[in-house]
Amino acid sequence: MPKLDNIKEKIALFKWIIGIMIAIVIAIAGWVLNKFQINENVLISIALAVMVLLSIISILLFRKIIALIDEVAKIKK
């Protein structure tokens, strides 16, 4: 059972991290849309790169969560 509890805690942590990263992506998207008229190409480019990077990390964490959920299912059987 300790292994099962450990996996469940990892899943909870990863879900929390994904939520934070999605909130950051939404905040950056709002900032980019707000500053789009201003000619700050470097800042906008950096912001878009960060959004893409955080989105990729979120997808990878989501895949890790799915793998952990499958592991929990195997342990329960």
Image (cartoon, rainbow, N blue to C red):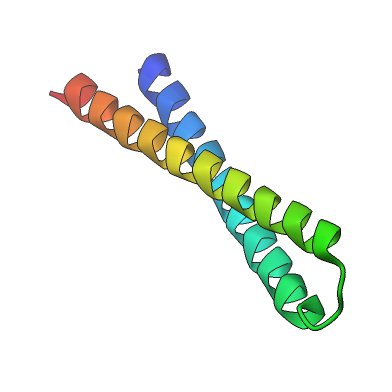
Question: Residue 16, image x and y in percent?
Answer: 57, 47
Q: Residue at x 28, y 28 (%)?
A: 72
Where 28 falls versus 51 (above or below)? Answer: below
Question: Residue 66, image x and y in percent?
Answer: 31, 37
Q: Residue furthest left?
A: 77
Q: Residue at x 27, y 24 (%)?
A: 71
Where 24 falls versus 39 (above or below)? Answer: above
User: Closer to the camera, 12 or 48?
Assistant: 48
Total of numbered circles in the picture?
Answer: 0
Residue 20, can we see it?
yes
Question: Residue 58, image x and y in percent?
Answer: 51, 45
Q: Residue at x 42, y 25 (%)?
A: 7
Relative side of 69 to 60, left or right: left
Relative side of 8 to 19, left or right: left
* Quarter of image, res 35: bottom right
State the quadrant of the N terminus.
top left
User: Closer to the camera, 29 or 16?
Assistant: 29
Where 30 falls versus 16 (above or below)? Answer: below
* Quarter of image, res 48: bottom right
User: Closer to the camera, 33 or 68?
Assistant: 33
State the quadrant of the C terminus.
top left
* Quarter of image, res 28: bottom right
User: Closer to the camera, 46 or 63?
Assistant: 46
Q: Residue at x 74, y 71 (%)?
A: 32
Relative side of 53 to 27, left or right: left
Residue 15, can we see it?
no
